[in-house]
Image (cartoon, rainbow, N blue to C red):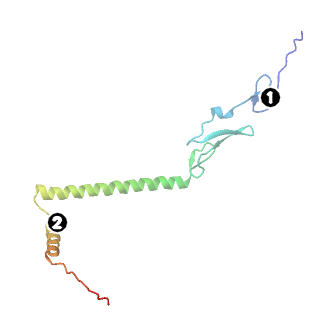
Amino acid sequence: MNKTTFECECQEGFTGIYCELKIDQCKNISCKNRGLCRMIDRKWKCFCLDSSLYYGNYCEYQTSGLTVKKVMAKSFSSVAIAVITLTVSFVVSMDVLKYVFHIDPVKAVRKKVKKSKNEAKSKPSKTVVRFQYIS
């Protein structure tokens, strides 16, 4: 029986008794922003899902386009909240004036609209009839 022992010198990226196991370098790599780690030529690389939004070795940096989009979204939501708040405040203040203080700021306008509708109803409608004789 031959009791010869051996030891393999593995190339970079491989391990095991016979260098049969490929080392997964992505096991300890955490790509940010949903990036995916993949092995290419025995080296790891983070692939950003959308390169127009994130970049860097770990997809850790935001592009200027994403930064602008975030600022615009915050600005739009701030404007929308302000408009909704102002509208609700206006309606509440009009109700307080009308029902608490018995002040109706639009009473004159309402009367004018009602009067014009009544005048339109009271006027007889003009019907034009045109006869055409055919021989």
For the point 47% across and 52% down, which residue is it?
A: 70
Crowd rating for badge 2 (residues with CA inside 10 Å; few <14, some 14–19, many 20+): few
Q: Please, what secondary structure does the residue beneath circle 1 have?
A: loop
Please determine whether, in this image, residue 57 is positioned above or below residue 118: above
Crowd rating for badge 1 (residues with CA inside 10 Å; few <14, some 14–19, many 20+): some
Q: Is residue 46 left or right of residue 131?
A: right
Residue annotated with mark 2: 106
Circle 2 or circle 1, nearest the eye: 2
Residue 92, by quadrant, is bottom left
Question: Label 2 amino acid?
Answer: Val
Q: Quadrant of the C terminus?
A: bottom left
Residue 93, by quadrant, is bottom left
Q: Nearer the viewer, residue 119 or 83?
A: 119
Residue annotated with mark 1: 10
In percent of width and height, residue 116 lies at 16, 74
Q: Is residue 81 left or right of residue 15?
A: left
For the point 69% across and 32% down, which residue is it?
A: 24
For the point 59% across and 42% down, which residue is it?
A: 35
| Residue that lies at the very extreme toward the front in this rendered image | 135
CB-based contact (under 8 Å), mark 2 and mark 1: no
**Between disc 2 and disc 1, whose residue precedes?**
1
Q: CA distance from mark 2 to mark 1?
A: 89 Å
Q: Nearer the viewer, residue 122 or 60?
A: 122
Question: Label 1 amino acid?
Answer: Cys
In percent of width and height, residue 45 lies at 67, 41
